[in-house]
Image (cartoon, rainbow, N blue to C red):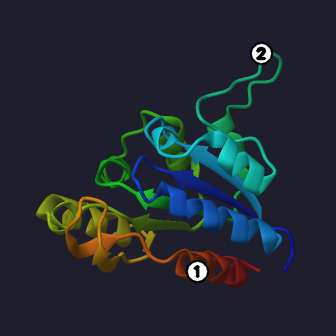
């Protein structure tokens, strides 16, 4: 596979630790992975984890060089062949559904012209909430691919739908998008 660039946007949910395996596997498969983390994601997994696995600096905020106006969210989006958001929280799903760009992840999303994949992960009641389901339907209609969550034991102790898809399934979904673009 030719060198591909993938952005992995990590949101603040306990399932963020599973995304480390996704980043590691994609990198081992020859994909150049740029990780963008929300402020809340950093409370679950540190940027150093993703930097070590991807071999690249992790983006946690806006950066604009004084000598070259090249905002990070624009430059990342321009070179991306695919954009994965995982674990996608109800908050971030709502933001991207309604064009709210108030952090590095959501501004990068709005700048992206490549295929976007979203892997939701949240409590089962939150996932089934009509507002969340409406937001998911809205982003689907706009062309975002949803990697459906699994049913299982959730971090809150309940059992239900909302568990992040298995990392292998996420990786295969991303690789499928990249293959289709080749």
Q: Quadrant of the N terminus?
A: bottom right
Q: Along the line of sight, which residue is nearer the eye, 105 or 180?
A: 105
Label 1 residue SS: helix
In this rendering, would 87 be left or right of 7? left
In this rendering, would 156 be left or right of 89? left
Residue under the point 46% across and 38% down: 43
In this view, 165 is above or below 111: below
Between discs 1 and 2, the one toward the N terminus: 2
Residue under the point 14% across and 63% down: 129
For the residues marked 1 and 2, what is the alpha-carbon distance in whole angstroms? 41 Å
Q: Along the line of sight, which residue is nearer the eye, 4 or 87?
A: 87
In this view, 14 is above or below 23: above
* Residue 171 x %, y %: 61, 76
Near mark 2 (Cα within 10 A), the count class, few <14, some 14-19 or many ≥20, is few
Q: Is residue 138 visible?
A: yes
Q: Quadrant of residue 178?
A: bottom right
Residue under the point 41% across and 58% down: 88
Q: Which residue is mark 1?
A: 168
In this rendering, would 11 be left or right of 80? left
Q: Along the line of sight, which residue is nearer the eye, 146 or 67?
A: 146
* Residue 162 x %, y %: 29, 70
Q: Which mark is residue 66?
A: 2
* Residue 109 x %, y %: 52, 50
| In this rendering, the label closer to the viewer, 1 or 2 | 1
In this view, 177 is above or below 31: below
In this view, 61 is above or below 132: above
């Amino acid at each position: 596979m030719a060198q591909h660039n993938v952005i992995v946007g990590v949101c603040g949910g306990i399932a963020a630790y599973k995304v480390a395996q996704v980043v590691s596997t994609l990198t081992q498969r020859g994909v150049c992975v740029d990780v963008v983390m929300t402020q809340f994601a950093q409370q679950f997994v540190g940027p150093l984890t993703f930097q070590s696995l991807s071999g690249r600096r992790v983006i946690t905020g806006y950066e604009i060089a004084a000598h070259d106006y090249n905002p990070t969210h624009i430059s990342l989006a321009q070179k991306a062949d695919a954009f994965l958001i995982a674990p996608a929280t109800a908050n971030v799903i709502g933001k991207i559904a309604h064009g709210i760009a108030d952090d590095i992840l959501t501004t990068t999303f709005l700048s992206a012209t490549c295929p976007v994949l979203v892997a939701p992960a949240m409590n089962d009641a939150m996932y089934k909430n009509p507002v969340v389901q409406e937001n998911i339907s809205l982003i689907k209609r706009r062309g975002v691919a949803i990697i459906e969550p699994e049913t299982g034991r959730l971090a809150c102790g309940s059992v239900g739908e909302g568990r992040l898809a298995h990392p292998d399934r996420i990786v295969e979904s991303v690789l499928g998008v990249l293959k289709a673009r080749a």
